[in-house]
Image (cartoon, rainbow, N blue to C red):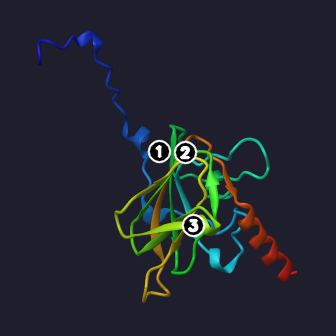
Amino acid sequence: MNKDIDDKNLPEIRTLSRNQMDKRIAIFKDQKGSKLGLPDSKLPECTRELINIIGFQPPKGDSKHVSPLGNDNAQIPAINISEGFNLGFCRCKPGKGPLMHNHDTNETFMPISGKWRCEWNEGKEIDYVDLGPCDVISFPPGSARRFMNITQGEDDVDHLLLVVIAGDAPKAEFTNNAYSRIKEFESSNV
């Protein structure tokens, strides 16, 4: 051991039992997601399965806010901890993804499979980047963003996008343009 390090200043290292760690393990093939729970869930262009692995507790406050993975998923995290971040997946076919929305915390995306378009801003300020497996984009709090599976030639194949969002109970809010599209869809399907 280095003589310059004082043992009394080192943090105590915890020993964890298998039972303690079993509560912090999520085997992906065993996970169940939800296709509901968000304002745009019923729109055909937004069909997607969201899988809550870590966190995503229901946000507190105003009813216009929802959990980023949907209020259904906020009830069933695979690993039920609140340690300052949330981790989940989006699984969908090409041409699908959420409407434009924002969060009160950072949101980071990393495609696991397929090709994904990540857009930000709306109207004439809209911009985007196309990402493949292991590419990463990180959106700051309050910025409008959306993503869509744009994989070519695999129309019936679901692809996977990793979603990491900061905080313990982050809030999602859709933009006015998104709510207009939701209202248009709902009024045409009455």
Counting residues from the start of the chain, the first of labels 3 and 2 encountered is 2
Residue at mark 3? 126
- Secondary structure under tag 2 reads loop
Callout 1: few (<14), some (14-19), or many (20+) C-alpha neighbours within 10 Å? few
User: Would residue 183 be visible to someone looking at this image?
Assistant: yes
User: Would residue 71 be visible to someone looking at this image?
Assistant: no
- Secondary structure under tag 1 reads loop
The percent position of residue 16, horizontal first and vertical second, equals: 37, 33
Q: Nearer the viewer, residue 35 or 117?
A: 117
Taking the spot 44% from the left edge, 80% from the top edge, the residue there is 151
- In the picture, which quadrant includes the C terminus? bottom right
Which amino acid type is marked by label 1? Lys
Q: Is residue 69 left or right of residue 152?
A: right
Residue at mark 1? 23
Which amino acid type is marked by label 3? Ile
Mark 1 in CB contact with mark 2 (< 8 angstroms): yes
Residue 112 vertical position relative to residue 83 in the rendered view, above or below: below
Residue 56 vertical position relative to residue 174 in the rendered view, above or below: above
Callout 2: few (<14), some (14-19), or many (20+) C-alpha neighbours within 10 Å? some
Residue at mark 2? 80
Callout 3: few (<14), some (14-19), or many (20+) C-alpha neighbours within 10 Å? few
Counting residues from the start of the chain, the first of labels 1 and 3 encountered is 1
